[in-house]
Image (cartoon, helix red, strand yellow):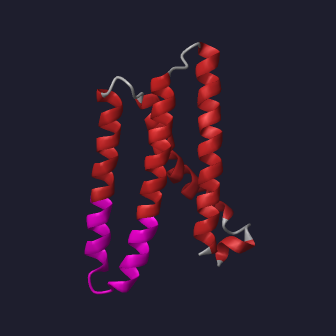
Amino acid sequence: MRYLDTLLKRCAIGWAVLAGAEILLALAVGKLSWPLIWGLLLGTLFSFANLALLVRTTANALDKQDHAVGYIRLHYVLRYLLTGVVIALGFAMDFLSPWGIIPPLLLPRIVFQFSGHLAGRDRHCSE
């Protein structure tokens, strides 16, 4: 469980840094807008919910050993369909910016990638 806590902390730090960097970049080029801010908020909240669903699915799959593969595949597809809907909303709604929505959705994958490489160096991640 400590590993998941570590990943969640890293994602939370990453989301905060990403949002700050994106807002500063938008300010620098004169493109800061409410749709960008609402997109960042929606993208970050959905990304957090998606990560929580992934953790929940993994924990529940351990209880369903006979049907674990099918259970994981079904929830994988459902999570990606929901992600597609959120991205489509970013393009379809005037009050949302896809430039605000998409980067927070990619952040957990980046954190997972680097955490895999850093896990050997972090003693508490190996538990």
Q: Nearer the viewer, residue 106 or 31?
A: 31
Q: Is residue 101 magenta?
A: no
Q: Main secondary structure of the magenta part?
A: helix
Q: Is residue 56 magenta?
A: yes
Q: Nearer the viewer, residue 110 or 59?
A: 59
Q: In the image, what residue occupies the spot 36% across and 78% down?
A: 61
Q: In the image, what residue occupies the spot 46% across and 68% down?
A: 55
Residue 73 place in picture, x, y as percent: 28, 67
Residue 66 place in picture, x, y as percent: 27, 86
Residue 53 place in picture, x, y as percent: 41, 63
Instruction: Identify the image quadrant of the N terminus.
Output: bottom right
Q: Is residue 25 left or right of residue 57?
A: right
- Considering only vertical position in the picture, is 118 above or below 106? below
* Magenta-tinted stretch: 54-77
Residue 57 place in picture, x, y as percent: 38, 70
The total number of labels drawn is 0
Indicate the quadrant where residue 118 lies. bottom right
